[in-house]
Amino acid sequence: MHTTLMYWSGFLLYAVVVITIGFKQYQLEKKACKTTDNEEYWTAGYNLSGWAVGFSISASMMSVSWSGMYGVQLFYWYGPGGMWLLIVPWLLTMALFYFFAPRFRTLKIFSQPELMHRHFGTSSRLVMAFTLLFVFIAWGGAEIYAAGKIIAPFLDISPPTAFFLIACVVALYSYSGGFAAVVATDKIQFFLVAFFMSAVAWLAFDHTQWDIATLESLAPPRQEAGQSVWLAPGLLLIVMTLVAYLPGWLVETDLWVRIQSAKTNREARRGIVIAALNSFVFVGIIPAVIGISALQLFPAENGIIPPYLQDGALIFTEVLARYAPVWLNLILSVGLVAAAMSTVDTCGNIVALSLSRDVLEPYFEKKHWDRQRLNRLARWSSVGAVGLALLYALFTESLWDIFYLSSGLLTTVVFIPVISVFIKRPSKWEVNAAMLVGLTATFLFYFLEKSGWSFGWPALKATGLGYIFWAFCASVISGIIVRYFRE
């Protein structure tokens, strides 16, 4: 059988499996007379076990774009020091979620825009919802982009065609099964992704040396001058990454909804522990093995990355093409598609949740829409969300910008209002001011930096992340100013 036909067979077989899972979930809802129950569609009945929560979070984080393409890129760019820019802040986030999960669950509120509406009014709900729309459209688009770029050569099609195929499959099972289908497919996707990542790591590891002398002699192309290979990104970039990521990730919506959907606090915490352990292995250790191996297999010459790697984005493709037999390539290609879909469906679900449940459904309920029409709206919102992610993928060029800008928005717009609920409550005026200024300032300073206009000391400018720092400061200061004048 021609190898391209084999890859197509694997892709189509997997597509049939996950679409069937979505349809089965719809049948279960129909049997329980819940096919028009939007609460069931969005929340899976608040009945997830710790294992379901843990594997769902794990599968979403073990994505092609995050732990695959981007995580491997970081270890290729910076060597062992790449750990400070992804896995370390993520594990810190998991620890914080473990501590705060029971507190978050006391709110008895499923979505963050819903939380804003209850405490600060409709304006806060809308700003929060539209911020989450942008963030998760960007993340879903990044995942489609990363997977499409890698899988397209094996299917012998263009990357945009691969983007379209991945988006169509996810849209189909998300439409039929909702959040329960997302979680159910995540369990299968986790094991496929784990096998995929492990196999690629073994292929790379088997062709390289791993003694301490070799590791310390590596020359990562982006290592900061004067820094050891263990702190290759430089201290300021490491600190700015923690500032950009930690606050926003602590209130990250896809984690929030899974924790809220758990049966009990104990199950929620169990899920976080499972996710943290899986993340340590599959977001930390394995991407490190692949990225550091790639420094030996495809070394940069005088700091210049070989053009065929496309800045490190095609390390997976090169390892598979050069070192994997055809039969293993076929199995791994299915794992790759699974990795992509597990994150695309998660991001699409959050986009649809924010658009339908938090913006459109409250409006149309006032127009006296019946349950059937509202449920149809929810299902088509899931399809539309994946479509928006596909459009974003078509215009994506840099995963670095996507992940820092979107995570920065979680920090500058989402973090302050959510945490405000747990402290001495500020007024809706202060919260709205902080959210609007944070949102506007993030984009303003981002585009100013991209245009060559940046602020602050030279070391901060060099990180390319000054816009997050200044936007966060502007958000905090705006809330303080509003409080001062209202008093």
Image (tube, rainbow, N blue to C red):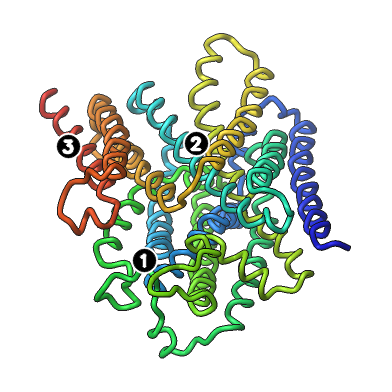
* Residue type, mark 1 in image: Trp
The one of 187 and 70 positioned closer to us in this rendering: 70
Q: Which of marks 3 and 2 is in front?
A: 3
Image quarter hosting the N terminus: bottom right
Q: Position of residue 386 (x, y in %)?
A: 60, 37
Residue at the spot x=55%, y=14% of the render?
364
* Residue type, mark 3 in image: Ile
Q: How far is mark 3 from mark 2, CA to CA?
A: 29 Å
Q: In which quarter of the image is residue 175?
A: top right
Residue 181 appears in the rendering: no
Residue at the spot x=70%, y=64% of the render?
332
Q: How far is mark 1 from mark 3, CA to CA?
A: 29 Å
- How many other residues sit within 10 Å of disc 1, few (<14), some (14-19) or many (≥20)? many
The image's mark for residue 110 is: 2
* Residue type, mark 2 in image: Phe
Q: Mark 1 points at which residue?
A: 84
Image quarter hosting the C terminus: top left
Secondary element at image label 3:
helix
Residue 372 appears in the rendering: yes
Q: Position of residue 136 (x, y in %)?
A: 49, 40
